[in-house]
Amino acid sequence: MSRTTPPRPLDVEALFPELANYRGTTTRLHPRPGRPEVTASSVGGPLLWPATEPWPVCTEPHSHARGRSPADIHRQRKIRAAAWLREPNPGPTDEERQLLEELGKEHRVQEAAATDPLPLIGLAQLYRRDVPDLPAGPDDCDLLQVFWCPFDAHGPSGHGMLLDLRWRRSWEVTDVQTSPPQPQVVGYEGYVPEPCVLHPEQVTTYPFAGLLPEDLCARIDAWEEAMEEEAEQAADESTAPTAGYQYDLSIPPGWRVGGFASWHTTDPSPMNCATCAIPMHLLLTIDSTEWDGGSGSWKPLEDQDLPTYQSARPTQLTVGRWGELNIFACPEAPRHPHRWSIQ
Ligand SMILES: [Zn+2]
Ligand SMILES: [Zn+2]
């Protein structure tokens, strides 16, 4: 089943015609729980990785001797999901509560595994044929594979995340690695994805308001304020217009490729390539939720009847404080080091 974004609550270009100059596209990936094939684009699915090539490992030394088992995390999620769907008494039973507590415990791995290089988690793979806004890879590469380390233990702060993105030519992989190494324990359950199939859909998008010309941004702000006032004064709330530039009209929530980054948590910061100094483009957004109360207008038509708790977190990943991770790439040289920002 495909996924369709509902029409926007209003035509923002009719209100601000000059926005047409800044119009872009982004591809919503619409991950949904499933059993992706190794030859499909996916989140948390099997990756098309050559059997003869070493699996990516964490390149920064940090302790990974203690943490939670990925198998426990998957099982805990299954029990919770089933318990909350149970009628007439949703929620875990006493017996389930006990089991959930047991599954939530940390484990210590044996000596060797604690000092060996840590295998990264294969997070996602995207084929260009499936994702209209995925830029061309270097040297005809058609497949982007995304890995991350399941510990917050990197960079100058010692608490940052570590990502590794690889481009490859899918047609060259004949012998696929069928049992890739996996971390025995993880530092945080939000790094462990549930397998999801993707339903890419290209939609229109506009830049974050703070990055538009000052005059245009000020007029959008004024329009939103006027609309809020009108909504407050309206006797019947159901007829009051309720659409905001940030949450309904510009940047969709959820996993997506290309388009514009949102800077709603921090002020916009320039993302220039560390190698050639040119401005980087948004490559991929990894989001903790596909929509929430504030961005509910983006909930696909096919999912309208699903309750939010069941459908808005298909990957079960959590980035930052229930936020999103924006990964930027050099538009000239896709292999230049990526940069990222958490919002
Ligand atoms: Zn690491
Ligand atoms: Zn560059």
Image (tube, rainbow, N blue to C red):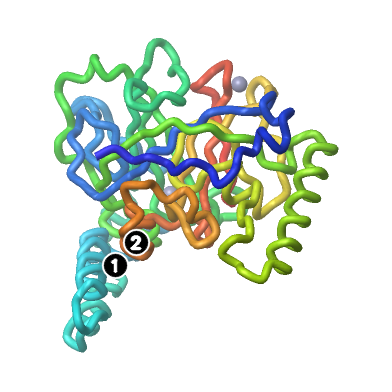
Which residue sits at x=59%, y=43%?
Answer: 10
Question: Against 109, is 271 above or below?
Answer: above
Quadrant in the picture for residue 227? bottom right
Q: Amino acid at mark 1?
A: Arg
> Could you give the CA–CA distance between mark 2 and mark 1, rounded to whole angstroms?
6 Å
Task: Kindly identify which residue carries mark 1.
Answer: 108
SS label for mark 2: loop
Which image quadrant for residue 262?
A: top right
Q: Which mark is residue 227?
A: none
Tell me where residue 17 appears, x and y as whole percent: 72, 30
Q: Residue at the far right: name it.
A: 215
Q: Residue at x 83, y 38 (%)?
A: 214
In the image, 130 versus 44, the foreground residue is: 130
Most distant residue in the top direction = 139
Q: Is residue 65 left or right of residue 95?
A: right
Q: State yes or no: discs 2 and 1 in contact (Cβ < 8 Å).
A: yes
First in sequence: mark 2 vs mark 1: 2
Q: Is residue 169 above or below residue 192?
A: above
Which residue is at a point 54% across and 24% down the rendered structure image? 336
**Residue 321 spot, x, y in % from top left:** 53, 62
Q: Position of residue 290 (x, y in %)?
A: 42, 51
Looking at the picture, tell me which residue is in the foreground, 179 or 130.
Answer: 130
Three-letter code, disc 2: Ala
* In the displayed structure image, the side of residue 34 where residue 216 appears, left or right: right
Q: Residue 318 occupies which quadrant of the picture?
A: bottom left
Mark 2 residue CB less than 8 A from any atom of ligand 1: no
The N terminus, quarter of image: top left
- Residue at numbered disc 2: 65
Q: Nearer the viewer, residue 4 or 284?
A: 4
- Give x and y (percent) for residue 311: 33, 57
- Label 2 neighbourhood size at 10 Å, few (<14), some (14-19), many (20+)? some
Q: Look at 21% across and 28% down and name the residue there.
A: 39
